Image (tube, grey):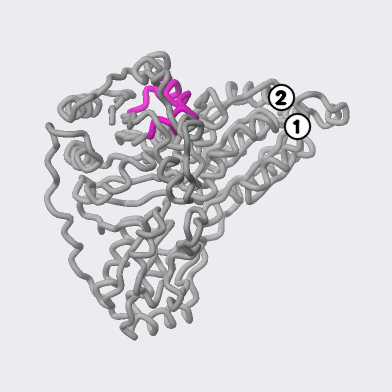
Amino acid sequence: MNGAESLVHTLLASGIETCFSNPGTSEMHFVAALDRIPGMRCVLGLFEGVVTGCADGYARMADRPAATLLHCGPGLANGLANLHNARRAMTPIVNIVGDQATYHRPLDAPLTADTEGFARPVSAWVRTAGSAATVGADAAAAVQAARLEPGQIATLVLPADTAWDEGGVVAEALAVPPAPQAAPATVTEVARMLRRGEPAMLLLGGKALRAPALALAHRIAAATGARLLAQQSNGRIARGQGRVPIERVPYPVDQALSVLAGTRLLVLVGSRAPVGFFAYPGKPGRMTPPDCVVQVLARPEHDQEAALAALAEALGAGEVPLPEAGPRPEAVRSGAITPEAVGRTLAALMPEQAVIADESVTYLRGSFAATHAAPPHDWLQVTGGAIGGGMPIATGAAVGAPGRRVINLQADGSAMYTLQALWTQARERLDVTTIIFSNRKYAILLSELAAVGANPGRTALDMLDLSNPDLEWPLLAHGMGVEAARAESMEQFCDLLTRSFTRPGPFLIELVV
């Protein structure tokens, strides 16, 4: 057995069953081992940023890590932006990155790079395999590190000779310790602070945004009068009928300050204290009022559902009915194409248990509440601010949640970063509906110009314009093997959206806004 074979066997034994890949020469023995050893689903991406984003979306829905296979340091570097997003989403991923053979590195061949140096800013665990005999143990340690709460990125660098040399040893899966519990004294203290009756808010993130934890948070809010809010960017939120409707900290600073105004106690549950996405002249960086006390109930690595259950018990917060989200909206089939009309139509037509991968950026920002009354669904965001995550996250989510329709709400400028994901959707026959909001500009940057007080002229505005020539999204999608059409009215949008939900495989709608 060579090192590559021991790697595949160990990954399978450790529960890794999917590998998103874009391999090169240094990884050929790993590729050959994947061919010989059954059990691993291998999904090809045409760009490493697609590969890493797919692994992010997959793990968010499957609740277990996938592996990525990347070609040397530059291949890893191509995937860093979406690994940055995955780190912010607290997503477990195991990166396998090929490298020069150990004895070839001193020759400084063209692809020689500081691969560990590239990996460290986005990885909680980094190791370079030293020999074929250690590859299996290294892989088991990588999977264990990735699965530690709340989810981490582990990167194993695999020099070519450690893959092709004989002497590989399969390692057993390593036990993953359970999530730590919030300290009883902390629960008692938070209960005491909430009983004071001051204006309070529970700010939720991580697994506190899954349905059972949200229901517990609602009980606490009902018993204490505290408000509930989700942090601004989240890996996964349970939403729709039968779930607690929850809003997010707004992106614009003035709106965030308004929402948090008057709060005297902010209790963090799997979240971080809210700060501005950027600094702006004359505006604060922290969104909490100066006199607000920030108290941690459960950190991201804690068992947040258990912490909320303990707090509910300490407060005597019994069962209460879930808030009514209201009737399911009706589709808007006429009139102007607006964010509100799109949001209502999406809520009206989406199938049950859909998965939303949201990189709509500015367009749907104000219509989040329109989907509270939709059927039960999960909502995934691009969490790290690195654009180009939406299409790959949607692709990986479709692999990680088979049988559920994935709906990618996608800004056109961001989509151009990783449109190769459409090819993977077609190749794997994934049930993904992509909605391109085609405004032919970087709309968010136009608002940011005003927010920072810049005074743009023609040169600046041209850098934010995506016309001249216009992007032809149906043609781009067809070139990737994905059926597509353009909608220029709400009637056309409704018809195409319904059509996409009733047929298998991927479909793209360019919505001209």
Q: Is residue 134 magenta?
A: no
Tag 1: residue type? Pro
Amino acid type at mark 2: Ser
- Is residue 388 among what the camera can see? no
Residue in the image at 74% along x and 40% along y: 128
Q: Nearer the viewer, residue 445 or 1?
A: 445
At 38% across and 77% down in the image, what residue appears? 264
Considering only vertical position in the picture, is 485 above or below 440?
Answer: above
Image location (x, y in percent) of residue 463: 49, 31
Q: Residue at x 37, y 69 (%)?
A: 308
Residue 368 makes an appearance in the image: yes
Q: Is residue 126 above or below residue 502?
A: below
Relative depth, front residue between 261 and 400: 261
Q: Position of residue 360 (x, y in %)?
A: 36, 39
Residue 31, x across and y down, in percent: 62, 23
Residue 458, image x, y percentages:
47, 31
Closer to the N terminus: mark 2 or mark 1?
2
Res. 26 mark: 2
Q: Is residue 319 left or right of residue 274?
A: left
- The magenta region covers 411-432
Quadrant occupied by the C terminus:
top left
Q: Please state, as top left, top right, bottom left or bottom right, where the N terminus lies in the image.
A: top right
Residue 413 in magenta?
yes
Q: How many marks?
A: 2
Disc number placed over residue 159 in the picture, else none: 1
Question: Residue 44, labelled with which disc?
Answer: none
Front-lying residue, 91 or 227 = 227
Q: Secondary structure at mark 1?
A: strand
Mark 1: few/some/many CA within 10 Å (<14, 14-19, 20+):
many
